[in-house]
């Protein structure tokens, strides 16, 4: 079974590579030191520091495996691949909520680098899916749990 392609912007690729390097070079050592210190306290069967450090070590190793897999299957969207005539991964889109008149700007990214708090939405999200392939002036309907939101696409630009 082939692994799922991970779509990343150049910034997203850099961020994942930096996180992987941090985990491998810094966090692994820190946790190993904590385990070594906890073992020095004696009996590890009832040693909460040891258990906590081992759990953190397992989390770190799992995250390293996940990041390595994501990077192995990464396809980086370059700026020249983004057609600003239509919404695509790597584009920043300005939308107007037709019900309330609010304007919002989203950057469409692959699911691996989505960060809704910072207005980076996945191409697989309901809003991302509704926007893909659409043009400035289009009105899109986005199905959300409370019903349907209508957005008008005001602008499409290349992500910085």
Image (cartoon, grey):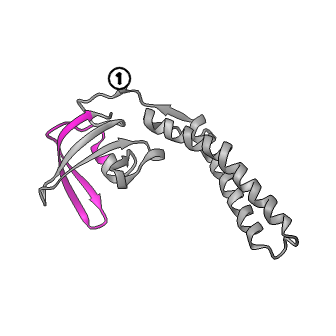
Task: Residue 112: say if magenta.
Answer: no
Residue pictured at 77% horizontal, 67% vertical = 50
The reply, left or right, for residue 158 in relation to residue 35 is: left
**Magenta residues, as a range?**
129-157
User: Which residue is at the far top?
Assistant: 80
Residue pictured at 79% horizontal, 65% vertical = 38
Q: Quadrant of residue 42?
A: bottom right
Q: Quadrant of residue 52?
A: bottom right
Q: Which residue is mark 1?
A: 80
Q: How many marks?
A: 1
* Element class at badge 1: helix
Choose between 134 and 64: the one closer to the eye: 64
Give percent across and percent down for residue 94. Answer: 21, 44
Q: Is residue 51 above or below residue 139?
A: below
The reply, left or right, for residue 78 in relation to residue 65 is: left
Q: Is residue 130 above or below residue 102?
A: above
The reply, left or right, for residue 80 in relation to residue 15 is: left
Choose between 157 and 54: the one closer to the eye: 54
Q: Can you say which quadrant of the picture contains the N terminus?
A: top right
Give percent across and percent down for residue 72. Answer: 60, 35
Give percent across and percent down for residue 69. Answer: 62, 41
Task: Residue 144: say if magenta.
Answer: yes
């Amino acid at each position: 079974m082939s692994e799922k392609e991970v779509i990343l912007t150049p910034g997203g690729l850099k961020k994942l590579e930096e996180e992987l390097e941090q985990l491998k070079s810094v966090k692994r050592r820190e946790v190993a030191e904590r385990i070594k210190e906890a073992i020095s306290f004696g009996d590890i069967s009832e040693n909460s520091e040891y258990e906590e450090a081992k759990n953190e070590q397992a989390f770190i190793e799992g995250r390293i495996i996940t990041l390595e897999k994501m990077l192995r299957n990464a396809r980086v969207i370059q700026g020249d691949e983004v057609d600003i005539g239509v919404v695509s991964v790597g584009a920043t889109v300005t939308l107007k909520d037709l019900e309330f008149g609010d304007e919002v700007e989203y950057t469409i990214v692959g699911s691996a680098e989505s960060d809704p708090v910072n207005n980076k939405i996945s191409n697989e999200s309901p809003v991302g899916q509704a926007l893909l392939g659409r043009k400035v002036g289009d009105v899109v309907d986005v199905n959300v749990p409370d019903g349907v939101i209508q957005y008008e696409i005001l602008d499409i630009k290349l992500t910085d």
